[in-house]
Image (cartoon, grey):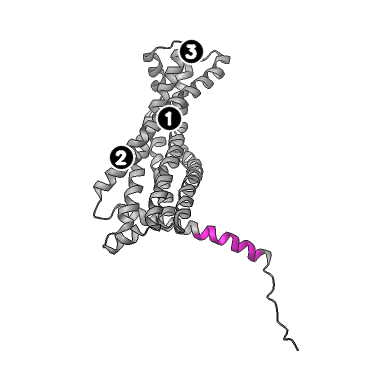
C-alpha cells in the first residue's frame, strides 16, 4: 500500500512579496556598508598618493575632451533654445545671464555627473571585476596588501576630487559654446557676453552646485567599485558589473540630485540651486 506524502503548503502572496524584496534590500545594505568602509579607508594611513594621482589623471584629465565637447554642444543648444523663447518678449539681452544660471546651477553639474558615470563608472566596474574574477585581488591580499584601501579608496577619492574640476570645465565650455552660437546668430561681442553672463552670478550661485558634485563623485566611485569588487561569474560577471555600474550610478545620481537641490535651496534661499 503506497505511503501518503504530505505536500508543503504553497507560499502565500505576502511571503513571495517579502522574498522578492529581500534581495534588493540586502544588496543596498551591503552597498551602504561598503560606502561607510570606503569613507573610513580614505582617512587611513598610508595614503597611496601615487595611485590617487594616477586615478585622478585617468578619471579627470582623460575625461576632459569629452567634457569640453559636450559642454560646447550643450551650451550651443541651450543658447539657441533660450533665444527662441526670449525673442518673443524682446529680451535677447538676457540670453547670456539665463544661460549662465542654467549651466552653473543645474545643467553643468548634472550633465557632468551623468557623463562621468557612463565613462568612469563602467571603467571602474570592469577593471575591478576583471581583477576579482582573475584572482588578482586575492593575490594582493596574499601579499599582505589591503586591497580595499589600495583599489577602492583611491578610486573613490579620485572621483570626489575630479568631479568638481570637471564641472567647472563643463560650465566654462558651455558658456563658450553659447557665445559661439550668439556670435554667429546676432554678432554679440565677447566682452559683453561674458560680462552679462557673470555679472549676475554670486558665489552662492556657483559654489553649492559645484560642491554637490563631490557627492556625485562619491556615488559613482562607491557604486562602481562595489559592483566590480564583488563581481563573480567570469567574463559574464565582469560585463554585468560594468553595465550595472553605469545604470545604478546614474539612477542614484539623479535621485540624490533632487535631495541636494532642495537642501541647497534651504541653506541658500536667495542664491541656492
From the image, tell me which residue sits under label 2: 57
Image position of 272 with respect to 201: above or below: below
Which residues are the magenta region? 14-26
Label 3 sits on residue: 185
2 vs 3, front mark: 2
Q: Report helix, strand or loop for mark 2.
A: helix
What residue occupies the far top of the structure in this picture?
A: 187
Magenta span dominant secondary structure: helix
Residue furthest to the right = 1
Query: In the picture, which quadrant includes the N terminus?
Result: bottom right
Q: Position of residue 76 (x, y in %)?
A: 47, 22
Q: Is residue 114 above or below residue 69?
A: below
Q: Residue at x 53, y 21 (%)?
A: 81
Residue of label 1: 104
Q: Is residue 188 above or below residue 99?
A: above
Q: For this rendering, which residue is in front, 249 or 137?
A: 137
Q: Is residue 63 visible?
A: yes
Amino acid at each position: 500500500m503506497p505511503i501518503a506524502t504530505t505536500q508543503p503548503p504553497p507560499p502565500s502572496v505576502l511571503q513571495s512579496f517579502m522574498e522578492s524584496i529581500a534581495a534588493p534590500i540586502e544588496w543596498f545594505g551591503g552597498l551602504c556598508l561598503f560606502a561607510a568602509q570606503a569613507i573610513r579607508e580614505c582617512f587611513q594611513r598610508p595614503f597611496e598618493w601615487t595611485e590617487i594621482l594616477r586615478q585622478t589623471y585617468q578619471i579627470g584629465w582623460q575625461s576632459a575632451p569629452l567634457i569640453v565637447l559636450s559642454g560646447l554642444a550643450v551650451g550651443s543648444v541651450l543658447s539657441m533654445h533660450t533665444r527662441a523663447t526670449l525673442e518673443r518678449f524682446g529680451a535677447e539681452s538676457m540670453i547670456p545671464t539665463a544661460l549662465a544660471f542654467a549651466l552653473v546651477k543645474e545643467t553643468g553639474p548634472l550633465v557632468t555627473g551623468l557623463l562621468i558615470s557612463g565613462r568612469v563608472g563602467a571603467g571602474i566596474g570592469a577593471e575591478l571585476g576583471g581583477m576579482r574574477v582573475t584572482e588578482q585581488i586575492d593575490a594582493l591580499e596574499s601579499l599582505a596588501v589591503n586591497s580595499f584601501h589600495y583599489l577602492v579608496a583611491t578610486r573613490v577619492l579620485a572621483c570626489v576630487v575630479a568631479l568638481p574640476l570637471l564641472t567647472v570645465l563643463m560650465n566654462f565650455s558651455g558658456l563658450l559654446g553659447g557665445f559661439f552660437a550668439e556670435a554667429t546668430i546676432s554678432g554679440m561681442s565677447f566682452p559683453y557676453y561674458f560680462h552679462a553672463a557673470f555679472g549676475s552670478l554670486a558665489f552662492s550661485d556657483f559654489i553649492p552646485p559645484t560642491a554637490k558634485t563631490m557627492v556625485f563623485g562619491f556615488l559613482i566611485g562607491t557604486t562602481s567599485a562595489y559592483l566590480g569588487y564583488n563581481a563573480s561569474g567570469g567574463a559574464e560577471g565582469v560585463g554585468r558589473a560594468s553595465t550595472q555600474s553605469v545604470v545604478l550610478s546614474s539612477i542614484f545620481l539623479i535621485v540624490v540630485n533632487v535631495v541636494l537641490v532642495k537642501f541647497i535651496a534651504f541653506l541658500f534661499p536667495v542664491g541656492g540651486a
